[in-house]
Image (cartoon, rainbow, N blue to C red):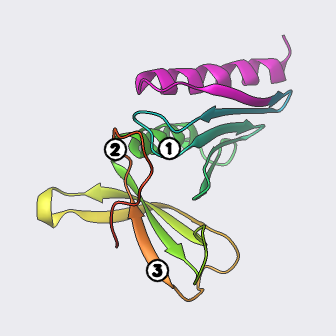
Amino acid sequence: MDFSDWHVARARALFSVLAERHGLRMRGADAGPDYLELELPVQYGLRIALKLVWARDMLMIRSDLFTAQFHLDADPEAETSFIETLDGLVTGAVRLHLFYWPRAARPYKTLLQRAEGQGEDAAWRTVYTWFRWLPWSPIAREEVFVNSRAPHLHVVGHA
């Protein structure tokens, strides 16, 4: 087993452990010597499909709503951040604050936010920002998505 095989095996094991932790089924999408992509499809416990990607020195969480990248060589805490973000997305501890252009079906900007504090005093702190093109574009509408143990996909409210 060469170095790349070891990394692919380690990434596959990490993704499998995370899926099992939340009782989610996973299916393989693509793999190569420096690349692994596994999919968590929409299912009970996950209202949006997620792709978990390992690409050389990077871990990613992808969906139609955002892509979060964690650079392993630049940040010693990248794997921990990846795990915490995925866990938060699945449990609902991390919400998606979505920004859309007029008549757009997909957001141009997504903030991954974690609640700080309890009850009415809770504030949402942005832990990751993703955007395509211009992040200062005019906002046509905003939505908030929080995962729950429901088998369907609906936006749960407005920001």
Q: Which mark is residue 148?
A: 2
Residue sitting at 47 percent across and 20 percent down?
20
- Start-end of magenta stretch: 1-30
Mark 2–mark 3 CB contact (< 8 Å): no
Mark closer to the observer (1, 2): 2
Give the alpha-carbon distance from disc 1 to disc 2, as whole Å. Answer: 21 Å
Q: Earlier in the sequence, mark 2 or mark 3?
A: 3
User: In the displayed structure, does residue 67 sit left or right of residue 114?
Assistant: right
Q: Earlier in the sequence, mark 1 or mark 2?
A: 1
Mark 1, residue position: 81
Give the alpha-carbon distance from disc 2 to disc 3, as whole Å. Answer: 22 Å
User: In the displayed structure, does residue 32 sit left or right of residue 148?
Assistant: right
10 Å neighbourhood of mark 3: few (<14), some, or many (≥20)? some
Q: Residue furthest bottom?
A: 138
Relative to 154, is 44 above or below? above
* Residue 73 placement (x, y as % from top left): 70, 43
* Residue 23 placement (x, y as % from top left): 42, 23
Residue type pointed to by label 3: Arg
10 Å neighbourhood of mark 1: few (<14), some, or many (≥20)? some
In the image, residue 23 lies in the stretch drawn in magenta:
yes
Tag 3, which secondary structure? Answer: strand
Residue sitting at 61 percent across and 19 percent down?
13
Residue sitting at 39 percent across and 44 percent down?
88
Q: Which mark is residue 141?
A: 3
